Each structure stands twice: as structure tokens, then as C-alpha cells.
Image (cartoon, rainbow, N blue to C red):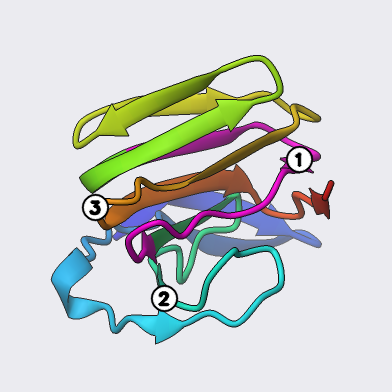
Amino acid sequence: MEKGWSCHQGIPVIVKEAEMKVIGMVEIPKEPITNPIFTGTHVTTQVLSLDSQDFVVNIVNFGKGVRNKFHSHSTEQLLFVTSGKGIVATEKEERVVTQGDVIIFYAGEKHWHGATADSEFSHIYVTKVGSILTPLE
């Protein structure tokens, strides 16, 4: 799809517009994660942001009772709960969250998130490309 014309070093070139992409969550394979930031081994991820230049978008699936340890990000992090029951926590509070809840952690905010003892838990997370995760425990 043409967006218009531009000039590069005086030569006219066609500028193409990016096209929409639809990704079905069930089509993306679940890959096991082995990382010391998690309190257990029953964690998988699904990479959704295959072509984004601006965002990292993935699904994280936690087994019952598994969470990540306190950490922070250098940019904001958004979580969109897709299934199960989880806990999101800062140093000041813990909240139980379920499908449809949206959470924002601000840049530098110390937090953790994961499944309750009696439920698996999945969320989509969004951060900016280049965001740095800092483990804090």
C-alpha cells in the first residue's frame, strides 16, 4: 500500500505504509522460561511483538503459586490479565487480579506479579523496546 512520495538524495521514492498485523494468541507456541527471577519452574512465555519497533509485547503464563521476585523496569510496564487469578504487589500493597484487569507499574517502581496458590495466571505485558529489568531481591 502506497503512502506517498518522498525524496532521498533528490531521487523520488515510494513510501510504503505499514500494514496491520493480527496475531492469534493460541497460534503462538508457549516456550519455557528458566530464569532466577521466578520462584518456580512452571513459567512459559509467548512472544507477540515480532515486528514492533516500539514495544515488547509478550504473554507470560505462571503455574499455581509461581511469581516473579521484586524487580523494576526502566520504563512503564502494562499488564493485561488474560486468565486465572494472580497477585500484583509493590512494597506498599498486594492486590488480587483476574481476567480483564489492567495494571500499570511506573518506571522504577519496585514490584512483583504472579499466580495465587490455587490458580494458574496469565497476562500480556507491554514495555518499551530497550526497557531494562532490574532484579531487586
Q: Which residue is mark 3?
A: 119
Residue 133 image point, x, y percent: 77, 52
Q: Secondary structure at mark 2?
A: loop
Magenta segment: does it hold 69? yes
Q: Is residue 20 visible?
A: no
In the rendered image, the quadrant that contains the N terminus is bottom left
Q: Secondary structure at mark 3?
A: loop
Magenta segment: does it hold 137? no
Q: Residue at x 59, y 45 (%)?
A: 127
- Say above or below: 75 vs 122: above
Spot the residue most to the top. Answer: 92
- On the picture, is 109 further left or further right than 84? right
The first of marks 1 and 2 along the sequence is 2
Q: Amino acid at mark 3?
A: Ser
Q: Which mark is residue 72?
A: 1
Examine the image and state in which quarter residue 23 appears.
bottom left
Q: Which mark is residue 56?
A: none
- On the picture, is 9 further left or further right than 89? right
Residue range in magenta is: 61-80
